[in-house]
Amino acid sequence: MTEEPSANEFQHLNEEVRDIWDANADFWDQRMGEGNDFHRDLIMPNQLALLDIQPGDNVLDVGCGNGQFARQMADRGARVVGVDIAERMIENAVSRSQDYGDRVRFAVADATDENAMLKVGEGAYDAICCTMAIMDMASIEPLSSAVRRLLKPGGRFVFSVMHPVFNSPKDLVRTVDRTETEDGLIIDTYSVKISKYIQSVAYKGLAMLGQPEPQHYFHRPISGLLNVFFRDGFTLDGIEEPVFGSDTAPNGTLDWDNFNQIPPVLVVRLRPGTAR
Ligand SMILES: C[S@@+](CC[C@H](N)C(=O)[O-])C[C@H]1O[C@@H](n2cnc3c(N)ncnc32)[C@H](O)[C@@H]1O
């Protein structure tokens, strides 16, 4: 992403994104189930607070994966449509949602294709969410434009991403330094070291250890991420940087639980302006 890809290059990259998520879908479904610790402790409570779902709200879940967050929103009274680029993700989402009837529906749709997104209902949604998927999308300009047109006036868009500063840059290293004070006290200092941040860059990595294929990540600095939406008239009116705090990991390990001053995810709420 250092240079704009040609249309052909972009299409090829995007097809690769889709195929990799298809290949990872069953592994993802088994490991994610109805939510892992990142979701339970950091993402879900903050997204639900910012979404402020009211019974009967129509909500769109973009990049819904196996539908775990879609079902959590339906449990709170929303009528949810979940879309994902990967067909196998949607098959798993459908089979996990049998008990929900038409309170949760799913479709394959590519968020980098504005016209495809509009087919799920222009002006139909009280709220739209995108959970930990924007950093997996090869382009986000079409999503911004689509979200503006899919929302009802006064609607809200809430998304979470790997924190662009502390958990996204390529070559990021997490470290723990152990020092002993003069009176024999052991002090562990947990830090994140980054050497590249400001440039948007694509690289491959693992969302979950052991997944069949590494996936593409699209790192964007905070300005690069939010300016796309600001240019489409969105305003930011909610932001959370949740940290783990349960202190259950063994001291001295690189478990995120020990990094209780460093947020691994960023959750924001955006609202479209009045101009459409
Ligand atoms: C890290 S998973 C998150 C899944 C789900 N939101 C969750 O939190 O459980 C990222 C998801 O984004 C989807 N995705 C990636 N690019 C996409 C695109 N262009 N359009 C729609 N979905 C996409 C992937 O198929 C994958 O299911």
Image (spheres, grey):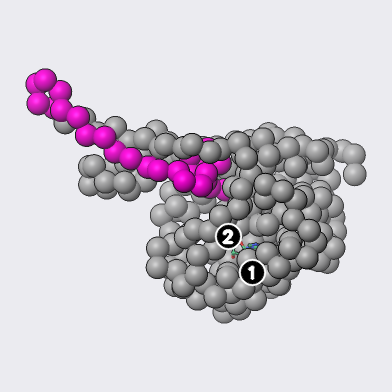
x 84%, y 52%: residue: 149
Q: CA distance from mark 2 to mark 1?
A: 8 Å
The reply to whether dot 2 and dot 1 touch (C-beta < 8 Å) is yes
Disc 2 marks a residue whose amino acid type is: His
| Residue 164 belongs to magenta span | yes
For label 1, the SS is helix
In this rendered view, identify the residue nearer to me: 256 or 203: 203
In the image, residue 156 lies at what x, y percent?
72, 45
> Residue 270: image x %, image y %?
71, 40
In the image, residue 60 sits, relative to residue 200, either above or below, namely below
What is the x, y in percent for residue 127? Answer: 72, 51
User: Can you identify the residue that label 1 sits on?
Assistant: 16
Give neighbour class at mark 2: few <14, some 14-19, many 20+ (Cα, 10 Å): many
Residue found 41% across the figure and 54% down from its top: 37
Q: Which one is nearer the viewer's eye here, 250 or 48?
A: 250
Q: Is mark 2 within 8 Å of ligand 1?
A: no
Checking the image for residue 216, the label placed there is 2
